[in-house]
Image (cartoon, rainbow, N blue to C red):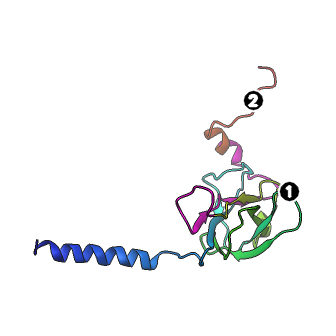
C-alpha cells in the first residue's frame, strides 16, 4: 500500500489540475462555444477547401417561443482558429436561443444565407442533459458570391451529384 501512495497522489494532482484548467460557466449560466468557417464551395458543410474565419462576429439571440423581441443579445469574435466563446449568465428555458453570424472580416467570403447563418443552442438546465455549463454550437459558415472553380470536382468526390431529372 505504501508503494501506491505516490502513484495515487500523482493521479489526484492530475485530476485537480484538469478541473482547475477547465472552462467554468458563470454561476447558474452557460458558456456557448462554436466555430465559424468560410464555405468556398457553398456546399452547406465543410470540405477540404473550407477555412476557419478569424475575427468574425457572432451574436447570441434568445427570443420567446411564440415570437417577439429578443430577451438576450450577446456578441463574440472568433479567435485565430475560428472559435468563439460567449458567456451567458442565466437560464433561458422558455426561449429559443441561436448563435447568428453578423460580420465577416473577409470581404471575399462575407455572404450570409438566411437559415444557414445560425446554430440553435439549448440554454437551460431543465432539459435532461447531464452536461452542465458548456454548450457546443454547430459550425456556421460565410459564403463567397460564387463557388470556386474546383468545387464541382470536390463535390463529385463526395458523391453529391444532382439527382437526374428523368429517373
Query: Which residues are the magenta region?
Result: 125-153
Mark 1 or 2: in front is 1
Seen from the viewer's position, the closer of residues 112 and 144 is 112
Mark 1 is surrounded, within 10 Å at the Cα level, by few (under 14), some (14 to 19) or many (20 or more) other residues, namely: few
Residue at image x 72%, y 66%? 92
Q: Residue 66 carries which label?
A: 1
Question: Which quadrant of the structure image shows residue 33?
Answer: bottom right
Q: Mark 2 points at which residue?
A: 163
Q: Position of residue 106 (x, y in %)?
A: 75, 70
Seen from the viewer's position, the closer of residues 156 and 131 is 131
Ranked by sequence position, the earlier of labels 1 and 2 is 1
Magenta span main SS? loop
Task: Say if 97 sits above or below 157 in the image.
Answer: below
142 to the left or right of 26: right
Secondary structure, mark 2, is loop
Q: Which residue lies furthest to the right in this view?
A: 68
Amino acid at each position: 500500500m505504501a508503494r501506491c501512495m505516490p502513484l495515487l497522489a500523482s493521479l489526484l494532482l492530475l485530476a485537480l489540475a484538469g478541473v482547475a484548467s477547465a472552462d467554468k460557466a458563470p454561476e447558474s449560466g452557460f458558456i456557448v462555444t462554436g466555430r465559424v468557417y468560410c464555405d468556398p464551395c457553398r456546399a452547406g458543410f465543410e470540405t477540404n477547401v473550407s477555412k476557419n474565419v478569424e475575427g468574425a462576429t457572432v451574436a447570441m439571440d434568445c427570443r420567446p417561443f411564440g415570437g417577439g423581441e429578443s430577451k438576450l443579445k450577446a456578441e463574440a469574435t472568433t479567435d485565430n482558429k475560428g472559435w468563439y466563446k460567449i458567456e451567458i449568465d442565466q437560464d433561458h428555458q422558455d426561449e429559443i436561443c441561436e448563435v447568428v453570424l453578423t460580420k465577416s472580416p473577409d470581404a471575399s467570403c462575407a455572404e450570409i444565407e438566411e437559415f444557414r447563418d445560425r446554430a440553435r443552442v439549448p440554454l437551460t438546465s431543465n432539459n435532461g442533459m447531464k452536461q452542465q455549463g458548456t454548450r457546443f454550437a454547430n459550425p456556421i459558415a460565410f459564403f463567397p458570391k460564387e463557388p470556386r472553380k474546383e468545387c464541382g470536382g470536390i463535390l463529385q468526390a463526395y458523391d453529391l451529384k444532382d439527382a437526374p431529372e428523368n429517373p
